[in-house]
Image (spheres, rainbow, N blue to C red):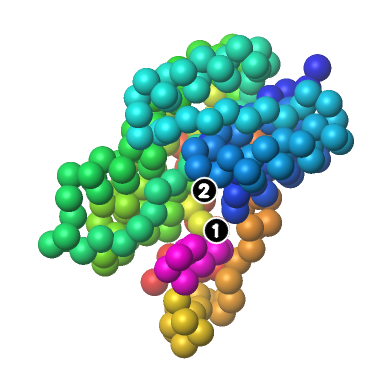
């Protein structure tokens, strides 16, 4: 019987790449999605054509507490041998401090911090039973901050510290770590022009973007190979966080 992995925000971008990688390596996969229904359905059809009944999709609004609880109940029903959770889903947009509204605070905190916390609450006992892993996708700016993204980076900083706290609380059965991407993908709908991209990459010691595959390989290590590291945040950023 194949092990199951649950990935939030798994229909596009980094989440999709993680889902495809684990499925290719004979894991059964559940992804959560919110708005990307077309992409989620297409991915399910594609991967279930390779291995029948090995890929499930669940729609949920991570801003809504009741929706998160229902999501987790469905995950538990589908996957008795759940072995890994990847908290990947993230709301991300700029907002200057003078423009922040309550709805921004709620939206950015819900997907980036509150939902991961309650997902771990509802699924944690199953992972303890199965001696599994949790990987939270944070951000290199969780530690340094970023102008115009105060709410987002505050949420990711909370996720980083939640990682450390849960690593202690869920030990020794569950390993809990986080991965902080650097310049991997440009922001959809807010992509900088070529001059700005060049300026950004000059601040990366390796002088280039990373790839989605760099994140996938780190997540793979933490889930399938790691046995003695917990409570750690790993920057995958080409050295950008060195300053």
Q: Quadrant of the C terminus?
A: bottom left
Q: Residue furthest left?
A: 98
Does any portion of residue 54 appear in the rendered image?
yes
Please indicate whether residue 228 sits to the left or right of residue 111 in the image.
right
Q: Residue furthest bottom?
A: 195
Q: Position of residue 10 (x, y in %)?
A: 59, 41
Q: Residue at x 55, y 64 (%)?
A: 185
In the displayed structure, 126 sits above or below 3; it is above
Disc 1 secondary structure class = strand
User: Disc number at residue 179?
Assistant: 2
Q: Is residue 186 magenta?
A: yes
Crowding near pointer 2: few (<14 within 10 Å), some, many (20+)? many
Check contact, mark 1 vs mark 2: CB within 8 A.
yes
Q: Can you identify the residue that label 1 sits on?
A: 236
- Magenta-drawn segment: 182-191
Q: Residue at x 50, y 42 (%)?
A: 35
Separation of marks 1 and 2 at Cα, in angstroms: 7 Å
Q: Earlier in the sequence, mark 1 or mark 2?
A: 2
Q: Nearer the viewer, residue 129 or 154?
A: 154
Q: Position of residue 101 (x, y in %)?
A: 17, 50
Crowding near pointer 1: few (<14 within 10 Å), some, many (20+)? many
Snapshot quadrant of residue 83:
top right
Q: Nearer the viewer, residue 166 or 47?
A: 47
């Amino acid at each position: 019987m194949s092990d199951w992995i649950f990935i939030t925000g798994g229909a596009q971008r980094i989440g999709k790449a993680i889902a495809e990688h684990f499925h290719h390596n004979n894991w059964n996969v559940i992804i959560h999605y919110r708005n990307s229904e077309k992409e989620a359905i297409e991915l399910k059809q594609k991967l279930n054509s390779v291995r029948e009944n090995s890929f499930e999709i669940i729609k949920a609004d991570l801003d809504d507490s009741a929706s998160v609880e229902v999501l987790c109940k469905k995950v538990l029903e589908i996957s008795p041998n759940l072995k890994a959770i990847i908290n990947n889903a993230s709301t991300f947009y700029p907002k200057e401090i003078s423009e922040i509204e309550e709805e921004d605070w709620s939206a950015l905190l819900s997907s980036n911090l509150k939902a991961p916390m309650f997902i771990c609450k509802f699924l944690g006992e199953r992972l303890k039973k199965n001696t599994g892993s949790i990987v939270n996708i944070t951000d290199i700016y969780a530690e340094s901050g970023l102008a115009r993204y105060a709410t987002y980076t505050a949420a990711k900083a909370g996720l980083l510290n939640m990682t450390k706290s849960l690593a202690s609380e869920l030990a020794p059965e569950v390993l809990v770590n986080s991965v902080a991407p650097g310049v991997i993908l440009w922001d959809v709908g807010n992509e900088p022009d070529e001059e700005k991209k060049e300026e950004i990459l000059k601040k990366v010691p390796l002088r280039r973007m990373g790839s989605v595959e760099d994140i996938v390989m780190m997540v793979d290590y933490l889930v399938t190979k790691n046995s003695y590291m917990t409570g750690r945040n790993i920057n995958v950023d080409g050295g950008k966080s060195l300053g």
